[in-house]
Amino acid sequence: MGASFYVLTTLVGALSCFFGEAADIPDLRYLKAYTAPNCTGAFYEFFDYTPELSVYAMDNSIISIRFTGDWMLYADNFYNFEVLGSTYYHRTGINICYNLDSPIAGNASSLRYAGSPYGIDDVYYNLYDGWAYSGDEFRSNTDAETVGHMDMRTTSVIIQGQSPWTFYTGLQFTGEAVCLYPTHLHSSGDIQIRTSFVYPVSNLGIPDNSIRSVAKGCLTDNVYRGALPISGQRSAEPLDHN
């Protein structure tokens, strides 16, 4: 069954807090936020959207992260909602450690993941109203005749899973259309994450803030084959869609 979500103010669950090493579960989406480099020292483990890190005494404290999934960290509360496109950090990986770069190191105030809440590589898409996957959001795993509150507001797009998606500039799958395939594969053992992310939407060849409906599959000959996204592609394997 498909599902669509309004998630701007979704409060969250950081389910566990540790001050030492713990066994990682390699096929579960998680993010461990450490207060020291190289994923050492005190950390808090997050599993869900966290609009205010201060709730967990982690505001402006994160220096390194170990994670599985597709995660974004933001310099401001509520995913840079007040300052769309402000400082952020975006990485995709499987049970991997990264030291945060300046200026986000020690400056993150919120975090969230992209993709399905049901499975690490399930077919899914996320639409964001700000540059760099910031601000308000519409997310779904099914066709959408309208994207509701995100109508003509989308500036950033992320897709995941084994299916392409077609984005339309008109309601009910009308207007200009562009097809976006997952462009990169992250894999470790039996775990895989297929993903693609683009901002601004104008890079897809349609106007920014023009998406009004979305359909699963590639339903147009207009297939995005532009430059690869800048963020989150380290250690990823490109996928070929000829």
Image: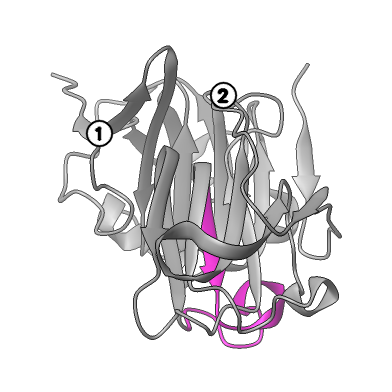
Residue sitting nearer the eye, 137 or 147:
137
Magenta segment, which residues?
70-86
Residue for point 74% across, 49% down: 48
Residue for point 45% across, 79% down: 105
Determine which residue is flagged by label 1.
222
**Residue 60 falls in image quadrant:** bottom right
**Residue 175 falls in image quadrant:** top left
Residue sitting nearer the eye, 58 or 77:
58
- At mark 2, the secondary structure is loop
- From the top left corner, tell me how far across and down residue 2 is, in percent: 74, 23
The vertical placement of 187 against 53, above or below, is: above
Q: CA distance from mark 2 to mark 1?
A: 35 Å
For residue 129, say whether it is visible. Answer: no
In this rendering, the count of numbered labels is 2
Q: Residue furthest front?
A: 20
Residue for point 80% across, 49% down: 16
- At mark 1, the secondary structure is loop
The vertical placement of 100 against 54, above or below, is: above
Is label 2 or label 1 in front?
2
Residue sitting nearer the eye, 130 or 36:
36
Q: Neighbour class for label 2 at 10 Å: few (<14), some, many (≥20)?
A: some
User: Residue 77 lies in magenta, yes or no?
Assistant: yes
Q: Amino acid at mark 2?
A: Asp
Is residue 206 left or right of 238 when viewed as pictured?
Answer: right
- From the top left corner, tell me how far across and down residue 181 is, in percent: 33, 30
Residue sitting nearer the eye, 219 or 123:
123
Determine which residue is flagged by label 2.
27
Q: Neighbour class for label 1 at 10 Å: few (<14), some, many (≥20)?
A: some
Is residue 147 left or right of 187 when viewed as pictured?
Answer: right
